[in-house]
């Protein structure tokens, strides 16, 4: 989407004959277009907070499977891409930059969804390590001290957790009890002040709708928000 400073708009165009995708950026002020790269199946774009780096996903060919996708970070200053992973037999499910833009948490999943892993990449050391062996939908706290994520047990029941970026501290905030009506079905987003986590549960009166909930971190108390406050953030559903 739009760059963090709202100055650039990224876009991609696929050639029908070669099946290659051209990735470009439109400068709103100068109304000029800058070509960045050409690849296959360009997807999963995520800007770093300072707007200097872009994480993206691509494929080695136009007929590659989801498990053959690769993830890279393109540096707008050096005009170079760094490959984080390639041919790892996992589906890349999510990307989330730390507030300072130095680290990137990304999710990996087997194609059947049975294994969900969270990895963390450090842009200084240019290395990745496993952060969580069972988790998905990671989001950073506004101050960068914590990462919230969801885990699902063998019955597909969710729990909400916090973990420090170095992996040394971890706590379970909420353990769900159901997979049906009222179950957590979205990632947990932070309030701007870091005091609350906001997430969606399956609406008790309408299984096709999502009802917003807030969890106060100071008291660990959950509150259902009024139906007028819709869960507007997109979510991938359980996969």
Image: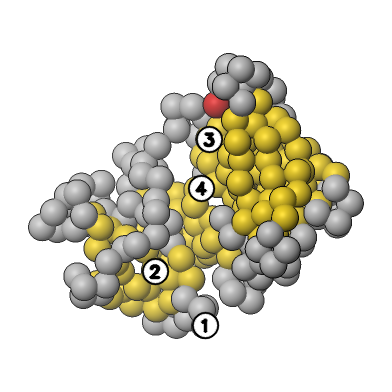
The one of 23 and 56 positioned closer to us in this rendering:
23
The one of 37 and 208 positioned closer to us in this rendering:
37
Q: Residues within 10 Å of mark 2 (few under 14, many from 20)?
A: many
In the rendered structure, the answer to whether residue 198 lies left or right of residue 82 reads: left
Pointer 1 with pointer 2, Cβ within 8 A: no
Q: Residues within 10 Å of mark 4 (few under 14, many from 20)?
A: many
The one of 190 and 76 positioned closer to us in this rendering:
76
Q: Which residue is mark 1?
A: 193
Q: Earlier in the sequence, mark 4 or mark 1?
A: 4
* For residue 238, above or below residue 169: above
Q: Which residue is mark 2?
A: 198
Circle 4 or circle 1, nearest the eye? 1
Taking the spot 66% from the left edge, 70% from the top edge, the residue there is: 5
Taking the spot 27% from the left edge, 72% from the top edge, the residue there is: 229
- How far, Cα to Cα, is label 3 from label 4? 9 Å
Pointer 1 with pointer 3, Cβ within 8 A: no
Q: Position of residue 25 (x, y in %)?
A: 69, 51
Q: Position of residue 186 (x, y in %)?
A: 37, 54
The one of 25 and 70 positioned closer to us in this rendering:
25
Residue 109 appears anywhere in the view: yes
Q: Position of residue 129 (x, y in %)?
A: 73, 46
Q: Which residue is mark 3?
A: 109
Q: Which residue is mark 4?
A: 135
Pick the quarter of the image with the N terminus: bottom right
Q: Earlier in the sequence, mark 3 or mark 2?
A: 3
- How far, Cα to Cα, is label 4 from label 1? 24 Å
């Amino acid at each position: 989407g739009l760059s963090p400073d709202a100055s650039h708009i990224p876009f991609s165009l696929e050639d029908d004959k070669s099946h290659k995708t051209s990735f470009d950026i439109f400068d709103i002020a100068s109304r000029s277009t800058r070509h960045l790269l050409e690849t296959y199946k360009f997807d999963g774009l995520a800007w770093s907070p300072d707007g200097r780096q872009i994480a993206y996903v691509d494929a080695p060919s136009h007929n590659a499977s989801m498990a053959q996708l690769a993830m890279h970070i393109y540096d707008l200053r050096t005009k170079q891409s760094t490959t984080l992973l390639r041919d790892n037999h996992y589906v890349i499910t999510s990307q989330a930059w730390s507030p300072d833009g130095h680290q990137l948490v990304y999710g990996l999943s087997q194609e059947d969804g049975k294994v969900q892993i969270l990895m963390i990449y450090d842009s200084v050391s240019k290395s990745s390590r496993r952060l969580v062996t069972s988790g998905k939908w990671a989001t950073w706290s506004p101050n960068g001290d914590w990462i919230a994520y969801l885990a699902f047990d063998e019955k597909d029941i969710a729990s909400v957790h916090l973990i420090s970026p170095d992996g040394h501290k971890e706590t379970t905030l909420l353990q769900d009890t159901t997979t049906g009506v009222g179950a957590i079905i979205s990632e947990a987003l932070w309030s701007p002040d870091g005091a609350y986590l906001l997430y969606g549960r399956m609406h008790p009166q309408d299984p096709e709708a999502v009802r917003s909930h807030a969890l106060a971190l100071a008291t660990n108390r959950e509150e259902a928000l009024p139906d007028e406050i819709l869960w507007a953030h997109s979510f991938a559903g359980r996969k």
